Each structure stands twice: as structure tokens, then as C-alpha cells.
Amino acid sequence: MTATKAPALSRPVARRPGLAALRLLRLELCHNAMLWIMPVAVALFWFTAARKTLGTPPLWNLRTAAMQPNAVLAFACPVAGAAAWMGSREHRRRTTDLVNITARPRPARLLATWAATTCWALVAYLACVAVVYAVTAQQATWGGPLWWPAAVAAATVPAIAALGFAAGTLVPGRFTAPLVALAAFFVLGLSTQPIHGSQSYWQISPIVAGAWDLGPNPEVGTFFAYQPDLAIAQVVFLAGLTAAVLGALVLPTGAGVRSLRRSALAVTAAGLLAAGTSVALAGTGRLDAHGIIAIPALHDSASDRPLRYTPVCSHTAIPVCLHPAYASYLPATAAALAPMLGQIAGLPGAPARISQVAATYQQGPDNSVSIGVTGSPTSGSSPVFRLLLPIQLLGPALTTSEMAGQVRSITGPSIMASVTGDGPDASQAQHAVTTALLMAAGVVPSHLPGPGNNVPPPGPSAGGGRYVALAPGSPAYAAARRFGALPAAVRRAWLTQHLAALRAGRIGLRQLP
Amino acid sequence: MNVEITGLTRRFGRTTAVAGVDLRAGPGVFGLLGPNGAGKTSLLRVMATAIPPTSGRLRLLGRDPLGYGPRREIRRRLGYLPQNLGYYRGFTVAQFVEYFALLKEMPAGRIPLAVTAAVDRVGLGDRSGARLRTLSGGMLRRVGIAQAIVNEPDLLLLDEPTAGLDPEQRVAFRALLRDLGQRATIVVSTHLVEDVGAACAQVALMDRGKVIFQGTPGDLTARGEGHSTGDAPLERGYSAVLAAARP
């Protein structure tokens, strides 16, 4: 230690609070626990969110909607834990007296620490999102990224950091951080349990990316414009929650400072108001026909119309046309349907085109939701068979070959049935002809659902076109085998002449050749 | 006067740590002596505005610290080294001192120079890039002194500043105190009477929350004449005053 004079500080000197705040933030950034937890957060994201997300079909809507809840859950634990750890730092390191007697107000000091935690968490999150979006951009064949789901997850980061930080500050201790991390995971994970139907206040949970009972909806952003009603409510809720928590955190320290106390109170009140309003709005959301949660107060009806697109079509006997977003599925879909389409192409009443359409959603009692195509599966003077791909429906994610298998075994028979007029109320002859055509197309009965079952097509829920499987050994099955074994030209000639009568139910089994 | 204390009392529940203390101190080094539990640390914490007094009047640097504005102005011109220095293990010496310079609202443009100067003055210039977790106890104490003096305080409060310092460092530290005391008021709480004798112009002795002696080190030495307890004259004075104050 030396007694030499230090450079004298001439007073007064102009203070630049902005620069000082930036330096404080820089120091906090250099020594923030979140910096060391980032690899954990990224690993969690990769092994939970990214793999699940990138395992879905390469559609922007599916990918972004799948990413939102998974990303929130992946980041919840590390962010909450790191924030709680930083919040309890002064107590753990016993610097409370030392920092409390400094001139800079405690709120500024705490906010700098919270901001540094949030910054690193956001950097990690945005890097992860960038990877998912970059991969999707290379794989997707139509459309562009949807930013609202990513924004909801991004808004969750400061909110979770604020909650964790507040917990660490108010209940400082070594075990606070791990407990807060676990609590964050379970609170978020369980936040969807009380959701019953579309009109639930709990839809405000950031892990809800749409109608909770349905999961990611492939219609939105492809057939219909994405409506961010719920996402807006969630972002406002999270921003309000963040403001309320931070305002409340700095509130007690404003004692003796009326203006500071008033500001903190105003921020807390505004945050609570915003959060409360958002929850109320989420409770008014209802499932609309396009399968999204529409909140009347936030809904933009002007944008609520089908998107224009030019379908991509196959060069099969009957063209199969899909939405360009599903272009990667066209070869497999067309290949699965081609043998069957070859059997019916050119017959009277056969569809001129197989065209993919959007599903219609309807909320039923409790949590039930019906999804399908309203009306007849075929429509128009030049009949068009309206197709729903299996990946447009609820269920586990399908590979392309799995989806093609379902198209072959379910959609194909439905198309055949729509030509013969088959269905539960149809004649035995209609059942037999449909089965014969399928046999002729190489779709052996073992590929089809069990005998006696009405096989609902993937989508059309009304009108004709339901294949009814036949029991082997039955007279109808024998007639089907006989008819299917005829030379193609003979079979086609007979169908050209008798299809109208067959559809009208005027032909019996014995009249089949 | 930079420190004016009148009838100051501080209680923690039923315990009275500081009982009606009167104290005045201008520029120079002021030693606060006393046995363990005498109330030195509590008095220093009140003077550091870490805790408010239960009763009594306190003026620091000509201001009343009870008001937020004056308190903030006092804190800008205050340096404080607590008895148990908490620190952030991952910070380097320079970063830790810079952190407190920022918290003391020093002008941002002056901070780098002030940090370098403070670190140099405590003899850690060559370790300014070292992480605090790698430093010895004595070095950490010097880091604590550096953060306390980084803002060139007008009022410097040091609680047991020489604890953990080796003899050579203590000598250097006393020289630093004398230098700083030329323009600032420095209150040093210690139970090492040799520190007081070497560096302080004024000294107060506390026992059971009260100031039982206030004067120069020479006055205290004089009180010890004829008293047998203690190796050095100042120690004998210390013991004599304490013995006289106790029933």
C-alpha cells in the first residue's frame, strides 16, 4: 500500500447515467450464472424441443407451434434457477451491507442483475430458435416463418427470470435456486391441466400454442392466415407479469422516496392490470372453424379468409393436387393412390381431380372436437374429391411412408367408394364392386381394415363414399373376387355401362359378371 | 465537522448496541477502540447509513441521512469497509473495485483511472486481473480497502481494516490512512491499539454501547500511568479507562 496521491477527482463532474448503467450491465453480463447455465439450456432445448419440433412435417405452422411449448419448458428450469441464484447473490455472498450503502438505488442494481440474466437467456433462446427456423426454411416448400409463437416463448424468458429473481431476492438461500427451477417446470407443465374446452382462462399459459386439445394445427398459415389472437394475449400477459413482479420487487426499497415508490406502484399496477386483462381475454377465446383460438376482442376478421395458393398436382390418371406446403408429400400420395385412380379414371361419376382441402373444426361438449370436411366428399359439376391428408388430422406424427400407407388403405377405398356410391346403406353389389376394384388395384384385403367395419375416410364426414369391408367367404366377397378377376377392359366396359344403375342400387350381386 | 453525533442510540430488539453516543469528528483519522461487543460495529453501520439509528441525531458531511436525497449524496462521498467483507468470487480485483465505483455513482469517464489508482494504493496493482477466489485473506482485505477508497471519499469508515494484514502491510496501511486523513474524515474501528497510536489523531473508547473516553492517543496513554495491565503505554491507558468504567 502506498501513500502516494491518487489522481484527484475534481467535483462536480457531469454524470452520464446511461454509460454507467451500461458498464454495470457489462460487469453483470461477465459474471452471470446464466452464462454458465446456457449450455444446459441449449442441451435441454436440443434433446426435448428441437428434436420433437424437427420431427414434425416441415410445415412452418406445425414447427413453430410445436416449438413454442417445448422451448418454454426447456428454458424454464435453467432460467428460473439461474435467476434465483443471481437474486440471492448478495445474501449468499454477504455483500448486502456493502452494496446497500452505495448511492445507486437498489432497484437499479437489481434490475441490472436481472437484465443480465435475461439477456443471456434470450441469447441462448434466440440462437436455438434460429437453428430450428433455419432448418425449417431449408425443408419447407411453402410459406414463411410464423413469429408469434417464437415471440410468446421469448416473452416467457424475462417473465420466468423475473419470477426466479424475485424468489431468490426475497427468500435467499442455497436451495432456493434448485427449488425455483423445479417449481417453474411443474407450474408450467401443470398449467394446462385445468383446460376444458376452448374457453378456458388457462389458455394464457405460454405452453399453449393453439387449441390445447388439438395440438399444432396444420391448417393455420397454409389454408388460412395465422391469427395471433391467443399469442397477443399471452405476450401481454407475460409482459404484464414481468412488470408486476419487478415493480413489486423494488417497491419496498422505495420507502422514504415518494417518487420512486409511486413509480414502482404504477408499474406494478399496470403490470397486474395488463396480466389480468389478458387472462380475461383468453377466457373469451373459442375454437373457430379453422381450428384456431379466436378472441373476439383481438380478432382481425379482415384477415380471416383463405390464403391464395397454386396447388401442386401429380400426373396420375386422375390428378392429385396438394397445397404447395405439402408438396413434399405429393410423390408418396400420388404413388399410393395411382393404382386405384387408374381403375376409375374416365368412368362416369369418377372424380376429375383429387384435391386437398382444409379441415373444419368444431368444439363439442367438454373437450371433444370434431374435425372433418363438411358436405359430400365430391363436389362440383366436374367432380372433385376433397382430400384430407392423415397429417392434417389429430394423432401422432407420421413419417412420409406411414402417411402414404394410410392414404393407400383409407383414402383410396374412400375414393373408390365415392365412385360406386358405396357406404353403410349401399347394396351388396356396391360393396362387392368397390372391393373388386381395390383388389384389381392391388390393394389386397389384408391391407384394408377388418371386415364388417365402416371405414371412415380421413375427413369427409357426410355424404357417400364410405368403404365397407367384406368378410371373406361371404357371397359379396366371392362376387368381388370374381369381378376383380375379369380382364380390365371387360370390367371397365361393364362399369361404363352399369355404373349409374349400380350407384342407384338397382343391380344385385347375381347381376355382376 | 464531517461527523456530528448527538445522543445516538441503536437497539436490536431488547439489546442496546449503541447507547446515547455523542461524537464529533473533522478531517483526520479517528480511532474507535473497544472490546468485543462494545458497539463499535453497530455505530459504524449507523454512520455508514446501513442501518438507521433508533434515536438520536446524526449528521454526516453536513447532511441528515434520514432524508433520501441527502442520504444519497452522503453515500456518493462515503467509503465503507465492513468487518466481514463479502465479495463475488468470480470478479477480478479491478472488476470488483469498478463495480463499487459504479454503485457509488462515480462519473463513468473517471472510473478506469480511479480503479487503477485505488488498486495501486493498496498494493495490488500487479494482481488487478486476479480473480478474488484466488486471493489470500490479507489480499482480500486490501481489495475491500480499495473499493472503500475508490471514490476518494470524504468520510471513510473502516471496521477492523488491518485484520489479516501482515506487519509490513499494516505499516503501509497506516501510511495510507495518514495520507487519506489529510482531507477526509476516517473512522477506524479496531481493537488493535497500536494501529490507533500510529495513525490516529483522535480516539474514542467504547464499552457496552457507550463512549467512555474521547481524546488524543496521548491523553489515553496518560490515563495508563501507574496501571499495570498492558505491554505498551497505550494499552495500559486502554485497560485503565476500561477498568475505571466498569463497576
Image: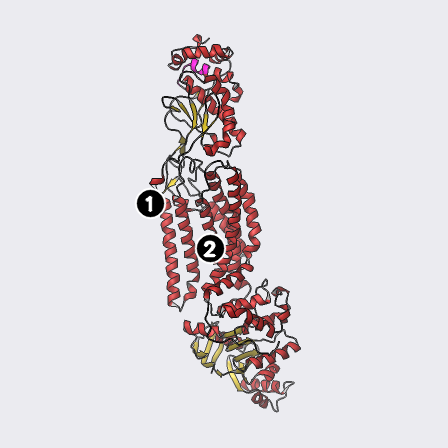
Q: Helix or strand or loop: what does disc 2 sit on?
A: helix
The picture places residue A419, in percent across and down from the top left corner, at 42, 18
Specify whether A248 is left or right of A1.
Answer: left
Q: Which mark is residue A163?
A: 2
Would you say residue A428 sits in the magenta stretch?
yes
Residue A76 visible, this orientation: yes
Q: Chain of mark 1?
A: A
Q: Out of A176 and A132, give the one closest to the viewer.
A: A132
Q: Which residues are magenta?
A: A425-433
Which residue type carries mark 1? Ala
Which residue type carries mark 2? Leu
Q: Measure how far apart labels 1 and 2 are at the Cα level.
A: 29 Å
State which quadrant residue B201 falls in. bottom right
Quadrant assignment for the N terminus of chain A: bottom right
Q: Helix or strand or loop: what does disc 1 sit on?
A: loop
How busy is the neighbourhood of tag 1: few (under 14 within 10 Å), some, or many (20 plus)?
Answer: few
How busy is the neighbourhood of tag 2: few (under 14 within 10 Å), some, or many (20 plus)?
Answer: many
Q: Chain of mark 2?
A: A
Q: How many marks?
A: 2
Q: Which mark is residue B9?
A: none
Name the image colouring: secondary structure
Specify whether A316 is left or right of B89.
Answer: left
Mark 1 — residue?
A297
The picture places residue A286, in percent across and down from the top left corner, at 36, 40
